[in-house]
Image (spheres, rainbow, N blue to C red):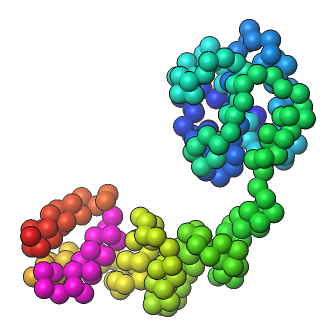
Amino acid sequence: MVIDVTDATFQTEVIERSHTVPVIVDLWAPWCGPCRTLGPIIEKVVEATGGKVVLVKVDTDQNPAISQAFEVQSIPAVYALKDGAVVDGFMGAYPEHVVQQFVDSLLPTEGEATLAALLAEGTEGAFRAALEIEPGNEDAIVGLAELLIARGENEQALQFLARIPESDRTRHTAAKARVHVAPDDDHEATLIGLLDQVKADEVARQQYVDLLELMGPDDPRTAAYRKKLTARLF
């Protein structure tokens, strides 16, 4: 896959896309002879990956912001990104076998491909199989925990979540496991009732924090209730 990218589309087409597939950025210009030599070679090699690697081309004359971001000194300049970060690169025109090695280094290993397929399947069996390959995989643990919570096995879900470092995702899922509320509950009455208990009762304090986690930062009440919690504790 070859995509022409501009300053305006770089975030979506390169940074965000690189979280799901390796992205190669080819910085070139129409007046650049070596660029015209390298272009067809890198396009051919990337095309042969069948979508496992994506190639984006950036005309440096038309998109100076991208060039500045990469601190490009000369072209052609080629960079590979995974998960939003540059992982490899080179400058100048190279023969096909060198470009082939560069692209091959970005392809997922057999184990990585298997893991990705299991996560995409999204079943309990697939998540458990993924954890056999990578015991600390956050996607597998959170996915499995969500399935366990859906059928009421909340303690088991919390045990899985405890295996990995806390993150925004694990906090939210853990809050689901600990707090039992009706889907249409706006939490107001519960939060107000808990305020008098949060200072002396650790269980009440955790429930209060979990409810705020479930409400999320976009709920305009969340910040106000956090301030009320702080006032009661300190």
* Residue plotted at (72% across, 68% down): 115
Residue 179 appears in the picture as rendered: yes
**In the rendered view, does 56 fall on the left or right side of 184?**
right
Quadrant of image for the N terminus: top right
Rendering coords of residue 13 (x, y %): 62, 38
Residue 190 appears in the picture as rendered: no
Residue 213 belongs to magenta span: yes
* Residue plotted at (14% across, 67% down): 230
**In the rendered view, does 210 fall on the left or right side of 156?**
left
Snapshot quadrant of residue 10? top right
Quadrant of image for the C terminus: bottom left
Snapshot quadrant of residue 215? bottom left
Residue 202 belongs to magenta span: yes
Q: Using the image as rendered, state which of residue 208 and residue 91 is in the foreground.
A: 91
* Residue plotted at (72% across, 25% down): 91
Rendering coords of residue 176 (x, y %): 40, 79
Q: Which span is picked out in magenta?
A: 198-216
**In the rendered view, does 228 fall on the left or right side of 128?**
left
